Amino acid sequence: MFERSGNVKAFCMRAKIHVKKANKLPVMFDYQYYLAAVMYRKLACVDFIKADETHRSEGYKFFTYSNLILEDKKACKRGLEFQNAYIVVSSPNKEFIRCFAQGFIQEPEFNLGKAKLLVEKVELLKEEQMGTKVELKTISPIYSKTLRETTHGLVEWDLYPKDGKFHENIHKNLVERYLEYYRREPQDNFEITSLLDFKPKRVSIDNSYRRCSLMRFVATGSQELLQFAYDAGLGEKNAMGFGCVEVVK
């Protein structure tokens, strides 16, 4: 059930959780809030203190994960119908990856709403080494917001890549999280230079909808910031399953 991919001596900053449907009910379209709760439960299986501290923390949380990546999606109006899927979990902290992987192994069954899923295999992935230019695509949507003045005062405004503030906030957030995690200033160079594909997406989180972005893009910058973007995710609410990216081969 537990596998390593690539060189076993490589630093593993990602886990790939292979799952299958264990009942006939489809997964609801807006499952992200439920998946976030599952992630904390799996972390608590192995390290309750780490899970509790992470959940309560007012600061950044240094992990992210993908949407359910469906390997055999079937047409269904009531939700997501499939037999096999996987979730990618990513973090610059290898202890997070170990805990998540072990948590899914120890308790392989979990629910997303009424749909029951069963973990078939947990695969540790070889670390992807970043250069100074890379093509990436989102495997969970990027979320970014700002405050804007309206006739009703300041309100939160969700941003899309066509807005320059989106890029400014992505950059600023990335540098702030890097500084908090590593306790040192990075070589501050990061830019999305080409937006190759974009799809807006609305995600329901705790009874409110967030507008976010599925993207394929080229990013350039310092190796350390590109690596951190890959490991920890881009944008806000990474621990809620936003901003996970993968390299386009």
Image (cartoon, grey):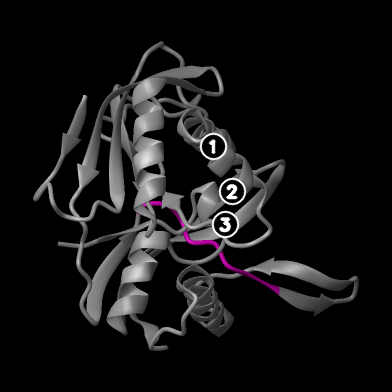
Q: Residue furthest top?
A: 23
Mark positioned earlier in the residue sequence (2 or 1): 1
Front residue of 26/233: it is 233
Residue 109 appears at what percent x and percent y?
Answer: 42, 18
Front residue of 202/133: it is 133
Does the CB distance between marks 2 and 1 fall below 8 Å? yes
The tag on residue 237 is 3
Helix, strand or loop at label 3? It is loop
Q: Residue at x 24, y 71 (%)?
A: 135
Mark 2 vs mark 3, CA separation in Å: 13 Å
**Magenta-tinted stretch:** 139-146
Image quadrant containing the C terminus: bottom left
Residue 33 appears at what percent x and percent y?
Answer: 59, 39
How many residues crowd around disc 1 within 10 Å: few (fewer than 14), some, or many (20 or more)?
many
The amino acid sitting under disc 1 is: Tyr
Q: Residue at x 49, y 68 (%)?
A: 181
Residue identifier under label 1: 40
Position of 79 with respect to 57 (left or right) is left
The tag on residue 54 is 2
Is 144 a magenta residue? yes
Q: Nearer the viewer, mark 2 or mark 3?
A: 2
Front residue of 158/93: it is 93
Mark 3 vs mark 1, CA separation in Å: 14 Å
Residue 108 appears at what percent x and percent y?
Answer: 38, 20
